[in-house]
Image: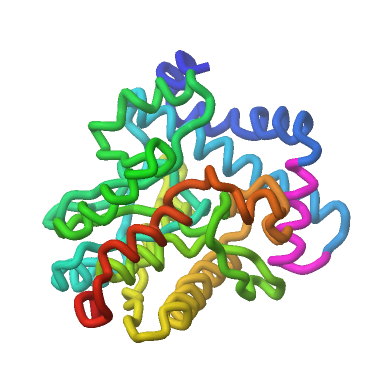
């Protein structure tokens, strides 16, 4: 498969995406049903035919995103043109000299965002991500760790200290905001229903003073031979630092999730969650002592680096 990705022209690969999407669409009925439920919540109820059509479109988009991801890893040029909208927002955030949290979700071209972003003239970029549980895939990803400065949040309980360190150094740190894996979370309204989001990014921002800049790479209509990707950089979210820590976190979380909801509603078939996104967390996940540091670990780090409310006041 990787050999095919390396040698087949991009235009030809794109023509094969319905085939690959169809295979996974057929072989993964539970994922397909979950996608259909998620899309129904975002877009509203529809006919069976339309439900299948839009879920298949999502599978096709996801197959293309995976193909582009492997192409990038193999140093194969992409037929993609990237346009940035809102770059001034991250430039202004950088000027605060507290680092910047570029938060994103499983939306659009999120997996290859370090390759597509226009970071010239900005501080060093780091990507925080969970370690791949499959050893073979992890070994593959490891080859690119130094190239893209990846910090694995599940590698060590101390990895969260590294996240705080790079922010204190003024770096831009990419973080996921939409996948709850255990530990601290907050239930918030999302697309007309309640969904649960990890509080880690906001807690880290409050602890370090780093502004949060929502960042999304969305595929939009291009030309016959080129794909157009728009990098949206939204206005920075400043996390308050009052004596009411819980209220500070809740307010910033609500702002961040609202921005995310707006993009999900605009681009629902580029929203890649193959499980019931609105299902309440299980008791096991709520109390999981092995949860990734971007939940419980960041909370502990915040307590360690916040000697008083004045030090990190924004």
Q: Can you tell which quarter of the image residue 95 is in?
A: bottom left
Magenta stretch? 31-45
Furthest-right residue in view? 48
- Image location (x, y in percent) of residue 101: 31, 61
**Left or right for 78, reference 218:** left
Is 48 in front, or is 238? 238
- Whether 37 is among the magenta residues is yes
The vertical placement of 214 against 288, above or below, is below
Q: How is the image coloured?
A: rainbow
In the foreground, 4 or 37 = 37
Quadrant where the C terminus sits is bottom left
Residue 13: horizontal and vertical position, in percent? 51, 28
Q: Is residue 212 above or below residue 30?
A: below
Q: Position of residue 271 (x, y in %)?
A: 59, 54
Name the one closer to the observer, 66 or 4.
Answer: 66
Drawn side of residue 280 relative to residue 87, left or right: right
Q: How many marks?
A: 0
- Find out whether residue 88 is within the magenta segment: no
Spot occupied by residue 14 in the image (x, y as percentages of width and height): 53, 33
Mainly helix, strand or loop, the magenta region? helix
Q: Residue at x 21, y 53 (%)?
A: 165
Q: State the image quarter where residue 98 is shown.
A: bottom left
Q: Residue furthest top?
A: 3
Residue found 68% across the figure and 57% down from its top: 281
């Amino acid at each position: 498969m990787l050999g095919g990705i390396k040698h087949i022209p991009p235009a030809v690969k794109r023509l094969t995406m319905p085939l690959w999407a169809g295979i996974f669409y057929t072989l993964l009925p539970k994922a397909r049903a979950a996608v259909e439920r998620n899309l129904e919540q975002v877009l509203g109820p529809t006919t069976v035919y339309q439900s299948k059509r839009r879920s298949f479109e999502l599978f096709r988009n996801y197959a293309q995103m995976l193909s582009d991801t492997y192409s990038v890893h193999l140093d194969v040029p992409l037929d993609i043109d990237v346009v940035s909208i809102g770059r001034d927002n991250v430039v202004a955030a950088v000027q605060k000299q507290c680092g910047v949290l570029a938060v994103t979700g499983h939306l659009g071209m999120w997996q290859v965002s370090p390759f597509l972003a226009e970071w010239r003239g900005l501080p060093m970029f780091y990507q925080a991500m969970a370690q791949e549980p499959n050893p073979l895939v992890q070994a593959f990803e490891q080859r690119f760790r130094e190239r893209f400065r990846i910090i694995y949040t599940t590698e060590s309980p101390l990895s969260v200290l590294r996240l705080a360190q790079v922010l204190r150094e003024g770096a831009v740190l990419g973080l996921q905001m939409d996948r709850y894996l255990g530990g601290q979370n907050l239930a918030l309204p999302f697309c007309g229903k309640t969904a649960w989001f990890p509080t880690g990014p906001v807690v880290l921002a409050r602890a370090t003073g780093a502004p949060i800049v929502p960042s999304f790479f969305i595929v939009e209509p291009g030309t016959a031979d080129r794909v157009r990707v728009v990098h949206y950089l939204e206005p920075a979210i400043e996390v308050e630092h009052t004596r009411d820590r819980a209220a500070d976190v809740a307010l910033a979380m609500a702002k961040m999730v609202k921005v995310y909801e707006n993009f999900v509603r605009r681009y629902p078939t580029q929203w890649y969650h193959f499980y019931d996104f609105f299902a309440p967390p299980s008791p096991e996940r709520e109390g999981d002592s092995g949860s990734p540091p971007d939940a419980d670990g960041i909370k502990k780090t915040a307590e360690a680096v916040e000697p008083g409310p004045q030090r990190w006041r924004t």
